[in-house]
Image: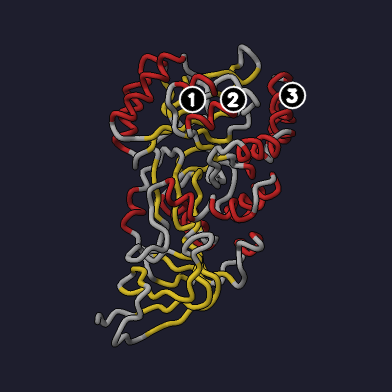
């Protein structure tokens, strides 16, 4: 038996939605369901334990103006940790955050490289801004730099049109997604509107961020192809404010954004009802603060997703989708402990009792 401190988690351990155990042990930073013999320095934590929460769309190292320094990025990651988010899919950042991987006290990050956008068709200082002829090359570059994901900007306002429009011709998207898949990376895309979605899905995309443009004719296509969505409803809540700011210059865009906002809950519920995988993401790190994962779960419930499924979308199901373990035997001990059963009331996610990362209780 090692002399390392041992953690004993007692109460109810939610290994899965219905797989509930009375206790687990953390030995050498990893989960064990066998009581260790000869353990010394045992610390006990009691409550309802979940795998560390997942934010499947956030941005570490980024703020509203572009890349930030390492100190700011560290604060972002710590804010997420305090909220119980221990696994993040960084959906595009111009900052190099690889140093976080060497910090056992910071959440784990799955990176999608840097956003890839059309020239002058995205937020300044965020993305590689290129033309379609260069799309395959940049997708290959980011596939090699990332952690198995690439992020495209699928649509954005076209100032000549005065509304949202697709950024890429279909043939460019098809070639780029094929190249990413050849290199072993999945592809996701920022999409607010309706008119970029069919080309992206039929070209083989794996996920769509926001997906406010999902319509009745597109939902069966997503379901058939198994394309996931990350609705980021806490971000979609800002659409009315954005629309008001652009009203005078782009009235058609403003009206469109309001329509997308008004139907947001119906869109998400219809997607869920059709069997489309839905995951929790906050879009933190742009204009939104970090630490909003509990608020996003609550928004999914408001949209009509059953609480147990909304909880799975930030825990068991999300971790499986991203290829990361939960509370299996031998897995890294990343878990969050609550005072009450989060399956019964997702609101308890807003108040973690204890956060355990890599087997260490972080206060």
Residue contact at pointers 3 and 1, CB within 8 angstroms: no
Give the mark nearer the N terminus: 3 vs 2: 2
Q: Which residue is mark 1?
A: 201
Q: Residues within 10 Å of mark 3 (few under 14, many from 20)?
A: some
Q: Tell me the CA gap for discs 1 and 2.
A: 9 Å
- Residue bearing the label numbered 2: 218
Residue nearest the viewer, comparing 216 with 134: 216
- Find residue 21 and name its label: none
Which image quarter holds the N terminus?
Answer: bottom left
Is 154 situated above or below 110? Answer: above
Report whether 13 appears left or right of 359: right
State if disc 2 and disc 1 touch (CB < 8 Å): yes
Label 3 sits on residue: 255
Q: Is residue 348 above or below residue 161?
A: below
Q: Secondary structure at mark 3?
A: helix
x and y, in percent, of residue 165 in the image: 58, 18
Instruction: Using the image, determine if residue 71 lies above or below residue 10.
Output: above
Residue 254 relative to residue 221: left or right = right
The one nearer the camera, 214 or 42, is: 214
Residue at x-position 49% and y-position 78%? 10
Measure the C-alpha gap from mark 3 to mark 2.
21 Å
- Mark 3 or mark 1: whose residue is earlier in sequence: 1
Q: Secondary structure at mark 2?
A: loop
């Amino acid at each position: 038996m090692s002399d390392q401190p041992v953690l004993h988690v007692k109460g109810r351990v939610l290994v899965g939605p219905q797989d509930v155990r009375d206790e687990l042990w953390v030995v050498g930073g990893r989960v064990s369901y066998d009581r260790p013999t000869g353990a010394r320095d045992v610390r006990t934590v009691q409550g309802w334990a979940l795998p560390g929460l997942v934010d499947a769309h956030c941005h570490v190292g980024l703020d509203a103006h572009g890349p930030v320094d390492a100190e700011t990025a560290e604060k972002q990651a710590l804010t997420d940790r305090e909220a119980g988010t221990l696994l993040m899919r960084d959906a595009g950042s111009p900052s190099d955050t690889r140093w976080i991987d060497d910090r056992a006290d910071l959440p784990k990050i799955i990176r999608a490289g840097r956003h890839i956008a059309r020239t002058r068709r995205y937020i300044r200082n965020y993305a590689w801004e290129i033309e379609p002829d260069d799309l395959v090359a940049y997708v290959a570059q980011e596939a090699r730099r990332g952690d198995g994901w690439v992020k495209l900007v699928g649509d954005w306002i076209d100032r000549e049109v005065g509304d949202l429009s697709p950024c890429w011709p279909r043939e460019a998207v098809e070639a780029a997604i094929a190249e990413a898949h050849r290199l072993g990376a999945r592809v996701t895309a920022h999409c607010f509107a309706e008119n970029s979605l069919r080309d992206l899905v039929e070209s083989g995309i794996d996920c769509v961020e926001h997906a406010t443009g999902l319509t009745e004719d597109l939902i069966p296509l997503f379901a058939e192809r198994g394309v996931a969505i990350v609705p980021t409803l806490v971000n979609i809540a800002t659409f009315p404010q954005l629309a008001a700011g652009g009203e005078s210059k782009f009235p058609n865009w403003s009206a469109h954004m309001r329509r997308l906002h008004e139907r947001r809950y119906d869109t998400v519920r219809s997607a869920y009802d059709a069997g489309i995988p839905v995951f929790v993401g906050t879009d933190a790190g742009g204009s939104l603060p970090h630490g909003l994962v509990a608020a996003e779960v609550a928004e999914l419930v408001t949209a009509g997703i059953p609480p147990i499924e909304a909880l799975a979308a930030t825990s068991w199901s999300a971790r499986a989708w991203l290829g990361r373990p939960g509370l299996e035997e031998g897995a890294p001990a990343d878990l969050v402990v609550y005072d009450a059963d989060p399956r019964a009331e997702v609101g308890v996610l807003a108040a973690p009792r204890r956060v355990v990362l890599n087997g260490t209780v972080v206060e």
